[in-house]
Amino acid sequence: MRRGKFEAGRNRSSGGAAYNHLEQQSGRKPQQSRKKKKTKIWPFVVGALAVVALAAGIFTAVSFRDDGKIFDNVYACGVNLGGMTQQEAEQALEQAVGDSYETTDLVIKMAEEGKELVFKPADTKVQFDAQAAAEAAYLYGRDGSIFAKARARSAAKLTDHVIDPADYLTMDEQYVQGVVDEEAATGSEMTPTKVEKKTEQRDVEETREDGSTETVNKDVQLLVITLGTSKRDFTAEDLRKAIDDAYAAHTFEAEFTYDFEAPEPVDLDALYEEYCTEPKDASYDEKTFEITPEVVGYGFDKEDVQKQLDEAKEGDEIVIELGELAPEITEEKLRASLFADVLASYDSPHTWINDRTHNLELACEAIDGTVLMPGQTFSFNETVGERTKEKGYREAIVYVSGESVPQRGGGVCQVASTIYYCALMADLDIVTRAPHMYFVTYVPAGMDATVYWGSQDFKFRNSTEYPLRIDASVSDGYVHIKLVGTETKDYTVKMTYDIVSTMDWKTVEKEITDGSYANGEVITTPYTGYKVITYMHKYDKNGKEISVEQVAVSTYNKRDKVVAVVKKPEESTEPTEPPTSSSETTPPPTETTAAPTEPTTPPTEPAPDPTEAG
């Protein structure tokens, strides 16, 4: 501990020069020898006595006027102590200062933004000696000769005299100077922050899938940040003076100005982007049917690193271990989950007609093995392509303007319809679908899809989170379709329909004169017309129905039965009784469900014409 910078002893000197001055003013001259002349000494005795009497009078006057109080206009800690006794001055200073030095932090605001040096009394142990300061105020003007005292008293009436509080402060010099030296240790040049990426081999404890741990020696990536240093153009003496002056002024807060240049702050976002890598999930290549392994990422906790930066000092080195960022989908998981589940399947029956069956086989061959990635859309026309002679497609019956005529590629809409029904059962997003012109029976009512190159397509989207594969084939009188993927639904689907209206056909006669048909022969087979509403029911794992949704409205036209009437000249002119209307109709699907009470608006887009026959 020390008593500030002002502990040096106070000078108390006497004023002997005043006597020399009085001697010069007395007018006495050096004695000269006189020969044989008798000297008269009494005038000298009288003069000496006069001087002594004068001095004694002045001394008596001064002593008489010293009332034991501090001279006028003597200040300490902003308090005018003039006219007070030493004890009163001590009390006044204690009241003015109180315990502020012992309880108040001293804050030095540095030039760099937001930086402060805070000196807590518990660390500095600063104290103010009010008794010594009061004593110094009392002694002012009382040192020296009687003439010096007289001059000091006269001067005090006209001029302020300040007792510097810093002379009477004590503190932990080692602590304060240590802080000062540390702050002043930076050089006159700014150094930038450096970042370096390193790799070290370390023993790392890893957790197995069964919860046990093992120690593995592996490469660990590190990010080493060496913080730069600022340019602070000041000396330790400059900073110490600012601290002492603030304490002396009893302000406890001061700004310390100097030239300052700091390195660029660490941008954690930019640092992360430059040195860290995001994990990549294992992926499936739909063209090569190969799995690309996952890529482990590396990163760090930005919040944790920012905390370290906030607590670090200039020039400190911060070592960040880049932790592994595991991808969500690994190759192992992907292999285990890819194509693990049959999301939906259906076998639609077909009658063996050589050319039509051949077309079904070609379409299935084009589709079989098609893989849709999550979000990808399947297009029947894009996948199968145009049904041409060069591809081997043959002519089979299609509907053209309501008539059944042979056309190349006829029959492939059965494949599209079977896929559509499976897509409904798998609850996938249907993008484009239109029903046939006439009712078909190889899929449930209202669950068919017609296609025609250049005008009508069937599309659905893989709305699952995993790749989806379409398996398609023809055998044993059936078109086989499977949608294979990864089941993530927590419900099952059941499709139903309701025939809300029926349009019966009638028999129409057509006169034949060219001999192409025999009398009574059927020229056009009939179809009953229907309006069908399709519903999707969802059930939870316990079999409880959780929702019913209308998914489609399908309208199928009726087609009248056309019968040939052949007239010959030799026949009687009596009219032949026309055949009665046949009661033969196409049997409707046997499964029906009650329609919801809420009406449904049918599709506004009509079925395409021509359309392929089912």
Image: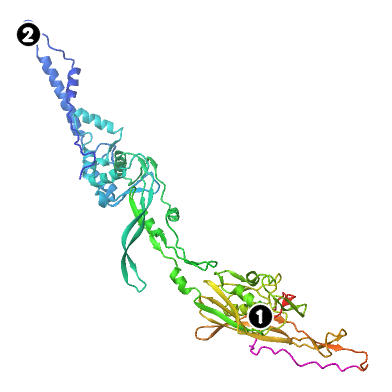
Q: Is residue 593 magenta?
A: yes
Tell me where residue 497 appears, x and y as whole percent. 64, 85
Q: Is residue 358 left or right of residue 309?
A: right
What kind of residue is marked 1?
A: Thr
Quarter holding residue 499: bottom right
Tell me where residue 227 appears, x and y as whole percent. 36, 49
Mark 2: give few (<14), some (14-19) or many (20+) Cα within 10 Å. Answer: few
Q: Nearer the viewer, residue 460 or 275?
A: 460
Quarter holding residue 506: bottom right
Q: Residue 357 carries which label?
A: 1
Q: Mark 2 points at which residue?
A: 38
Q: In this view, does 16 lie to the left or right of 39?
A: right
Quarter holding residue 456: bottom right
Q: Is residue 6 magenta?
A: no
Q: Is mark 2 on a helix, strand or loop?
A: loop
Magenta segment main secondary structure: loop
